[in-house]
Amino acid sequence: MKIVIIPCSFDNYSYLIICEKTGEAAVVDPAEFYPLFREIEKTGARLQTIYCTHHHADHIGGLEDLLGEFPGAAVYGHGSDQRRIPGMNHSLADGSKIRIGTVTGQVMHTPGHTSGSLCYLVEDALFTGDTLFGGGCGRLFEGSPKQMYDALNGRIKLLPGQTRVYFGHEYTLQNLKFANFVEPGNEAVARRLHQTTVQRDLGQLTTPSNLELEWQTNPFLRCAEEGIVRSVAEKFIGEAGDPLAVFTALRRLKDSF
Ligand SMILES: [Zn+2]
């Protein structure tokens, strides 16, 4: 499997997954047509499938033009997004199996950012859309804090540490500034913040991350860690909360950080 990272629009990421044995390819999140089309042409890949993580316009902005070029492509999304993703012709649910040539994967329904948000686990690569970001997580537009907490901490966090995380936006630097603010004693956060600052100064991309790094540095996966619990209590809610209360406070605070 080859994964091509395709920066789109302002700070979106689309991804091209290519089965190197058969040349079959899939797009994850068709954010913008031209960057995707250029890459598909360049690689000579045969686009057969488009996987949407969710319905937001900045993630499907290139979908209709892409279908104009590749009218036979199958378009997948969560069943509940059928009417919100134009051209969607295949419904997925939690646990659905997917296949790109000989490459296989599995779908995780992870509501919170939107009600139909999906993550795609393809071999050791997890495509998280706006659910999990480098050092952060998506805003809660349609889901409850508990849904997002469960998706992140009850599902994604349990995958192996070497899982590569391909997220939907280049928000890592801003997220790590927040992480450093809420957990100033975490050396792994300080280190990653420094590295990411250098990377971004050089114009480098921070996707993919990996889950182990997220365990160590992403406050939204660290809601039971003593340092975070204490910091949130001191700074925001006045008393030590359970992990869900900590998550809820962190998410609310990040919205205005
Ligand atoms: Zn979104």
Image (cartoon, helix red, strand yellow):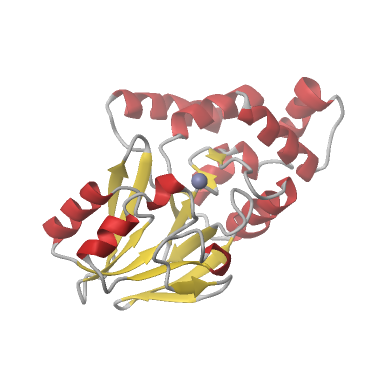
Task: Identify which residue, 134 or 192, lies in the foreground.
Answer: 134
Name the spot of residue 64 as percent of width and height, x first: 32, 58
Instruction: Tell me the quadrant of the picture where the C terminus can be found.
Output: top right
Indicate the position of residue 82 as horizontal and vertical percent values: 51, 66
Q: Is residue 3 left or right of residue 229?
A: left
Q: Position of residue 127 (x, y in %)?
A: 44, 56
Query: Image point 52% across, 55% down: which residue?
Result: 161
As drawn, 153 above or below 94: above
For the point 40% across and 37% down, the residue is 170
Task: State whether residue 105 appears in this view.
Answer: yes
* Residue 89 figure quarter: bottom left
Q: Is residue 64 left or right of residue 144?
A: left
Q: Residue furthest right?
A: 239
Q: Nearer the viewer, residue 59 or 235?
A: 59
Q: Quadrant of residue 110?
A: bottom right
- Choose between 134 and 228: the one closer to the eye: 134
Q: In the image, residue 107 lies at what x, y percent?
A: 51, 68
Number of numbered discs overlaid on the protein picture? 0
Residue 225 in sight from this viewpoint: no
Asked whether, in this view, residue 22 is left or right of residue 165, the answer is left
Residue at image coords 70%, 53%: 147
Which residue is drawn at the image coordinates 50% and 73% (left, top)? Answer: 91
Q: Quadrant of the N terminus?
A: bottom left
Of residues 251 and 20, the one drawn nearer to the viewer in this rendering: 251
In this view, 1 is above or below 132: below
